[in-house]
């Protein structure tokens, strides 16, 4: 899968507030799966068939959707389940002093 093959609707400007629903939607749209499968326990490789490079591309899409969010290559190697990704984003926003908006 490549970035050019995605049919995601990108916001015109990055969002300031963290929104778990938005993250879960981006995750589901990337491999084209049912959003109900995007649970905290879901493994990117096992359940979604995503390799390291797919996870990197997904994280780039998520960085583009949320202002000030950064992932490193090490993050991509360590984040294996959806819950880890969401906790990483929450921690990133907490360190920046943002108010988190949680929609589940």
Image (cartoon, rainbow, N blue to C red):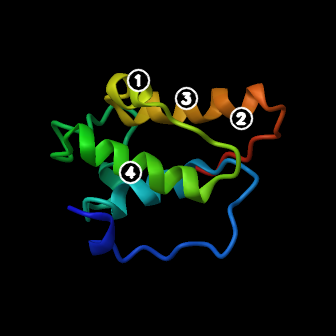
Name the residue at the front extreme: 73
Q: Are marks 3 and 2 in contact (CB under 8 Å)?
A: no
Which quadrant of the rendered structure holds the N terminus? Answer: bottom left
Residue beneath the point at 46% across and 51% down: 60
Q: Position of residue 68 (x, y in %)?
A: 70, 44
Q: Secondary structure at mark 2?
A: helix
**Residue depicted at x 67% and y 45%:** 102
Q: Secondary structure at mark 4?
A: helix
Residue bearing mark 3:
88
**Mark 2 and mark 4 in contact (Cβ < 8 Å)?**
no
Q: Is residue 81 above or below residue 5?
A: above
Residue, disc 2: 93
First along the sequence among labels 4 and 2:
4
In this view, the mark in front (3 or 4): 4
- Is 37 displayed left or right of 59 in the figure? left
- Disc 4 from disc 1: Cα separation: 15 Å
Mark 4 to mark 2 CA distance (whole Å): 18 Å
The span from disc 3 to disc 4 (Cα, nearest Å) is 14 Å
Question: Which mark is on residue 58?
Answer: 4
Query: Which is nearer the eye, 61 or 84?
Result: 61
**Residue 62: x %, y % from top left:** 51, 52
Please name which of the two marks, 4 or 1, marks the residue nearer to the observer.
1
Give the mark nearest the N terminus, 1 or 2. Answer: 1
**Residue 70 shows in the view:** yes
Instruction: Name which of mark 3 and mark 4 comes first in the sequence.
Output: 4
State the CA–CA distance, disc 3 to disc 2.
Answer: 9 Å
Secondary structure state at the residue bearing disc 1: helix
From the top left corner, tell me how far across and down residue 38 is, in percent. 35, 47
Is any part of residue 21 visible from this angle? no
Q: Is residue 15 left or right of residue 81?
A: right
């Amino acid at each position: 899968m490549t970035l050019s093959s995605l049919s995601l609707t990108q916001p015109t400007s990055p969002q300031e507030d963290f929104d778990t629903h938005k993250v879960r939607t981006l995750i589901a749209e990337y491999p084209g799966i049912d959003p109900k499968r995007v649970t905290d326990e879901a493994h990117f490789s096992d359940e979604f068939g995503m390799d390291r490079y797919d996870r990197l591309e997904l994280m780039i899409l998520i960085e583009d959707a949320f202002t000030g969010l950064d992932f490193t290559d090490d993050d991509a190697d360590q984040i294996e389940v959806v819950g880890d990704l969401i906790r990483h984003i929450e921690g990133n926003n907490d360190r920046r002093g943002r108010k988190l908006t949680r929609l589940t």
